[in-house]
Image: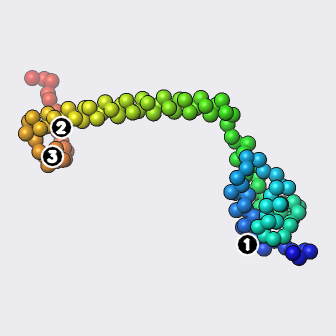
Amino acid sequence: MNAFRHLSEADILQACSIIDNWPLPTITWEAVCREVGIHLKHRFTRQALERKPQIKASFQARRDKRQGLVPADHAERKIAKLQARIMELEKALAEYDLRFLRHIERAILWDKSPKDLEEPIEEEIPRLRSDS
């Protein structure tokens, strides 16, 4: 390790990547300095890392992302609400499946082939007149 070393563009990109992919729920400059030092084989100070706008922005974005997490009870309520919505949609889908089967059954009874059923609907459907 050199006593003094400047951060190259590649070093900056790698440091940003380390911060962006931070696996822990909390992030500190001390931990970032340690992790960057391991990967770059040189220990940089917080000031050296923070002086680079890209690294500082990555750190702030990662910290803000952490602060944007929702409380567990809120997440549980949202999960329950989404599970209820899934059940509603599955029920609606089952009803559509039954409706589809009824339509197929009636099409077969009326001697319609799959080719007939795939024909496009006419562009202009004649409307019934109410003034008869």
> Disc 3 vs disc 2: Cβ atoms closer than 8 Å?
no
Image location (x, y in percent) of residue 91: 37, 30
Which residue is at 42% across, 29% downward? 88
Q: Which of pointers 3 and 2 lies earlier in the amino acid sequence?
A: 2
| Residue 10, label in figure | 1
Which residue is at 11% across, 38% downward? 108
The amino acid beneath tag 2 is Ile
Image location (x, y in percent) of residue 5: 86, 74
The amino acid beneath tag 3 is Pro
For this view, does 105 lie left or right of residue 29?
A: left
Name of the residue lying farthest toward the bottom: 2
Image location (x, y in percent) of residue 104: 18, 37
Quarter of the picture containing the C terminus is: top left
Q: Report the Cα–Cα distance between label 1 and label 2.
A: 63 Å
In this view, the residue in front, 60 or 25, is: 25
Neighbours of disc 3 within 10 Å: few (<14), some (14-19), many (20+): few
Residue that mark 2 sits on = 104
Residue that mark 3 sits on = 114
Image location (x, y in percent) of residue 62: 73, 51
Residue 122 shows up from this direction:
no
Neighbours of disc 1 within 10 Å: few (<14), some (14-19), many (20+): few
Q: Which of pointers 1 and 2 lies earlier in the amino acid sequence?
A: 1
Name of the residue lying farthest toward the right: 3
Which residue is at 78% across, 74% downward? 8
Which residue is at 35% across, 34% downward? 93
Q: Is mark 3 on a helix, strand or loop?
A: helix
Neighbours of disc 2 within 10 Å: few (<14), some (14-19), many (20+): some
| Residue 30, label in figure | none
Q: Which of pointers 1 and 3 lies earlier in the amino acid sequence?
A: 1
The amino acid beneath tag 1 is Ala
For this view, does 128 lie left or right of residue 39?
A: left
